[in-house]
Amino acid sequence: MNGFGPTDSDEHQPVMWLRGHAVYAAHFIVLVFVASMLVTTLLDFSRVTLHFAWLPFSSAEVLHGQVWRLFTYGLVNPPREVGFQFLFDMLMIAWFGRDVERYFGRRTFLLLYGCIYLVTPVLFTAIGGWLPVSRYGETGAFALFVAFATIYPGALMMFNVLAKWAAVILVGLFTLIALDARDVTGLITLWATCGFAFAFVRHHQGHFTLPSFRLWRRKPKLRVLPDLPANKADSARGVKANSMAEVDALLDKIARSGISSLTSKERAKLDSARAELLKKDSGRS
C-alpha cells in the first residue's frame, strides 16, 4: 500500500454485497452504467424519448439553468450507438478502476472518478458561449486507465508493454483519430479527462502542490485603547516604595543639617513613618 493511501480500514471495504460477492466502488459504478443501458433500451423499445430530451448534456441548456444535465449525461447509453465501446469501458472501470480504488481507498477514488465525470461538462459549459456542445454516454473509463498507468507505470500490459507506454500510445492514437475526424469536442474531452487524472494522481503522490492565492485583505484600523487600570497590589507597593524613599531623604537631611532643619510637614511625615514602623514591630511581637 502506498504511503499516500488512506489508513482507515473502512475505505477498503465493499460498498455492498450481492449474493455473497463483494461489490466495491468501481464495481458499483459499472452496475449503475449497466442499469442505465438497460433502462435506455427499455425506453427505446417503448418509444419513450423523454430521457433523450432531459438527460443529455447541452451547454446551452445548462447555461439556461438546467444544471442537472451536468450529472445525468452519462446515464443515456443506447446500445445501438455505444455498442462494444461500452463493453470495453465497463471492463476498464472494473479492472483498472478497482486497482485505483485499492490504491487510494474508496473516498479518494470516488472523488477522482466524480471529477473525471464532471470535468467535461463543466469545461464545455464554461466555453459554451463560443462552442455550444451536446454530449451523452460518457463513462470516463479511459481516464481511469491513465490514472492506473500513472500509479503503476511499470505494470505489464498486453504484449509485455509497460502501462505508461500503453497510455501514451493510446492517447496519441485517439488524438490522431480526433484530429482526422475534426472532432474538436472529442479531442478536448480526451485531453481534459486524461490530463486531470494524471495531475490528480501526481498531486496525491506529493510530486507537486497546488498554488495558494493570498487575496488582498483590508487591514483593520488601529485603535488607541485607554491604559488599563493599575493593579491594587501594585499600586500599594508603589505607594509604599515612594514613602520609604521620602523617609530616607528626610533622614539624610537630618544627618546633614540636624532635625531642626525639617519643616512641619516633614516632621509630620517622619512621625507618621515612625508610628507605622512601631505598629509593625508591635504586631510582630
Image (tube, grey):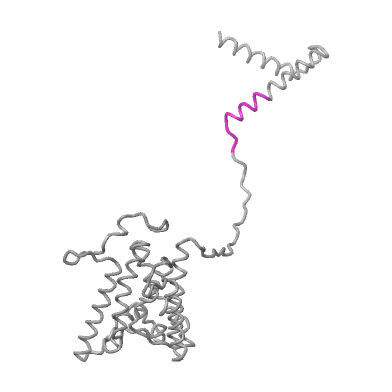
User: Height in image: 141 above or below 225?
Assistant: below
- Image side of residue 84 versus residue 151, left or right: left
Q: Please tell me which residue lies in front, 42 or 65.
A: 42
Q: Please tell me which residue lies in front, 137 or 67.
A: 137
Quadrant holding the C terminus:
top right
Q: Overall secondary structure of the magenta stretch?
A: helix
User: Height in image: 63 above or below 238?
Assistant: below
Q: Please tell me which residue lies in front, 30 or 231.
A: 30
Q: Residue at x 47, y 69 (%)?
A: 199
- Image side of residue 283 versus residue 200, left or right: right
State yes or no: residue 9 in magenta: no
Quadrant holding the N terminus:
bottom left
Q: Residue at x 63, y 49 (%)?
A: 224
Tell me which segment is drawn in magenta: 229-241
- Where residue 104 sits: x, y (%)? 37, 62
Q: Quadrant of residue 166?
A: bottom left
- Where residue 180 sits: x, y (%)? 46, 91
Q: Residue furthest front?
A: 159
Q: Quadrant of residue 74?
A: bottom left
Q: Residue furthest right?
A: 257
Q: Residue at x 45, y 74 (%)?
A: 165
